[in-house]
Image (spheres, coloured by chain):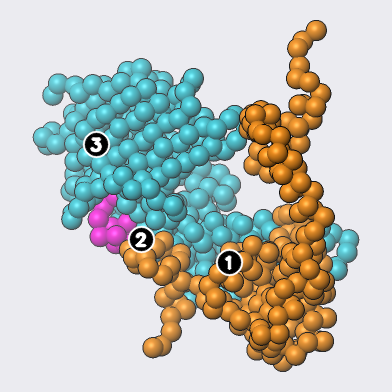
Amino acid sequence: MMYQYAESLTRLIEQFARLPGIGPKTAQRLAFYVLKMEQQQVEAFAGALVDVKKKITTCPVCCNLTDVTPCRICQDEQRAQTQLCIVEDAQDVIAIEKTREYKGLYHVLQGRISPMDGKGPEDLKIKELLVRLQQEQIKEVVLATNPNIEGETTALYLSKLMKPLGLKITRIAHGVPVGGDLEYADTATLSRAISGRREI
Amino acid sequence: MYLEKISLINYRNYESLSKNFSAQINLLVGANAQGKTNILEAIYYLAIGKAYRSARENQLIKWGNQHFKISGEIKNKISRSNLEIIFQNENQFNKGNKEIKINGIKIRRMADFLGNLTAVLFAPEDLNIVKGSPLERRKLLDNDISQVNPGYFSQLQKYQKILNQRNHLLKRMIGREKALAELEIWNMQFLNMCEKIIQKRLQVVEKLTPLTRLMQRKLTGGQENLEFKYLFNRQQEIKNGYPIRDILITEMEKVQKEELLRGITLCGPHRDDLLFILNGINLKSYGSQGQHRTAVLAIKLAELEFFKGESGEYPLLLLDDVLSELDQERRACLIKIIEDKLIQCFITTTEDVQFLWKNKKNIASFYVEKGSLSLLNR
């Protein structure tokens, strides 16, 4: 009979292999690394996995990830209650928060319109968005979906949907990266930056 | 502009090659299946960013290896640059990894790479431009425009993506018209790209038309008149200056019902065609083999002038095995044009054809055998 790994080890390798971006070889390497780790460390790791699943939920208001209900941003009364920034994923909220420029509320769509991935508007958190626009005193909506085809389509779809509501609807600007040199910007970005130029 | 030097590693049947070329005529002489065309293919690869003979790039790797590299030293009026393409195979199912560099600096987008070397290729299979499917004629336009207008290449890529998305949506909508609001948004995106691409193509057709007519007259002693017609959705002739957006909107409304039944996009630049009219008659249906060949040659020569007009310099001319197929008169005409205009030219033949040139000073003949090139004595 061919020699195989013990059952518990095989199981761990299989679990790692399910993660995105991890193939069978990497899974094996990770599993062996776990075997070498201190007991305490392994328990902390396992605990973190269970914990994150138990504690992190979706905020019923903005659909962002949260450990309290509603989430900390939705609870924060210091924030401008009239501004709403719409993003594709929870990571985008963090990215915008890091700028400390934006002081309003968020709404996380949890995806983008992409028929190739089988995702239509009905799969996004749009119903929740419309409820908010009715119930809260939002006056301006900032569409901060990604500047690619799918993000653009999602933004267009939403702006059309929200138009009758009489809100101020804005789209984030696209252009050259700050601190960079123009000569290193790619043509697509640069031509977009030129067509979207502003008077100063 | 000319290619001063090329280096190949594991490309087709070349394990390692590094050769300097003449700024004018380069004859690649050798028996069949020695790698003459592979040189042309590699040069053309640097111009259009992909292989024209093979859709799968891992087929270009020399058997038993995992990567290939093409690098070329380009010299134009004002500067000198190094272009490099490295393709790394990941596994046989995967598309692999392509890295492009200009002067050693990694470039992220193909659109920024194109245009540094322009080339016109004339190969036996180019008869398909006349005889083959509309795809061949769209490829002709798209390859030409991408070389002189790199933004067009990005637009084509974007168009393809929107088209894919729209087709997926249409397929999902078969039998149920629920997602009409979503389709409307995709239509907006689709329409914008369609308009840009068709507009650009029409502009180029407009420029190519008089150039081709002139070349055709030169080649036939003023006997034949060649014209182009751009056919929208394979039937409606449109020209530069037509209200393309309105035409597109009308057509999209017309086909929408059928699109929803069949689940595919039924109008747009991916379904357009280019018609060749010779003395008022459709060349594809009624022309002879010889007329097809002359017409293709006229188009290729017109392309040379087109590139010159757009970028200020003549492109490289790559002739794959075509000299033997032309009659004496046309061959002489072609050679005269190459000589007069000082175009760098790469010609593959099975025998040395130096005798065709009066002035042999700027001719370099290379003997090609089993993946190596050696300079022949003059």
Residue ID for mark 1: A95
**Residue lying furthest top:** A1
Residue B163: x and y in percent read 65, 59
Observer-side mark, 1 or 2, equals 1
What SS does tag 2 mark?
A: helix
Q: Main secondary structure of the magenta part?
A: helix
Which one is in front in this view, the residue at disc 1 or the one at disc 3?
1
Q: Chain of mark 2?
A: A
Q: How many residues crowd mark 2 within 10 Å: few (<14), some (14–19), many (20+)? A: few
Q: Which is more N-terminal, label 2 or label 1?
A: 1
Residue ID for mark 2: A184
Q: Mark 3, mark 2: which one is toward the viewer?
A: 2
Q: Position of residue B321 (x, y in %)?
A: 37, 31
Region of the chain picked out in magenta, as a range: B306-315
Name the quadrant of the C terminus of chain B: top left
Q: Position of residue B161 (x, y in %)?
A: 61, 57
Work out whether B325 lies above or below B210.
Answer: above
Q: From this view, report whether residue B286 is shown above or below residue B159.
A: above
The reply to whether residue A174 is visible in this rendering is yes
Marks 1, 2 in one chain = yes
Between B9 and B59, which is closer to the camera in this rendering? B9
Magenta stretch: includes residue B313? yes
| Image point (84%, 59%), residue name | B174
Amino acid at dot 2: Tyr
User: Chain A's colour?
Assistant: orange
Please tell me in which quadrant of the rendered image residue A66 appears: bottom right
Q: In screen coordinates, is B332 left or right of A118?
A: left
Check the residue under mark 3 and report the chain it is in: B
Q: Secondary structure at mark 1?
A: helix
Q: Nearer the viewer, residue B255 or A43?
A: A43
Q: Which residue is mark 3?
A: B5
Q: Nearer the viewer, residue B197 or A8?
A: A8
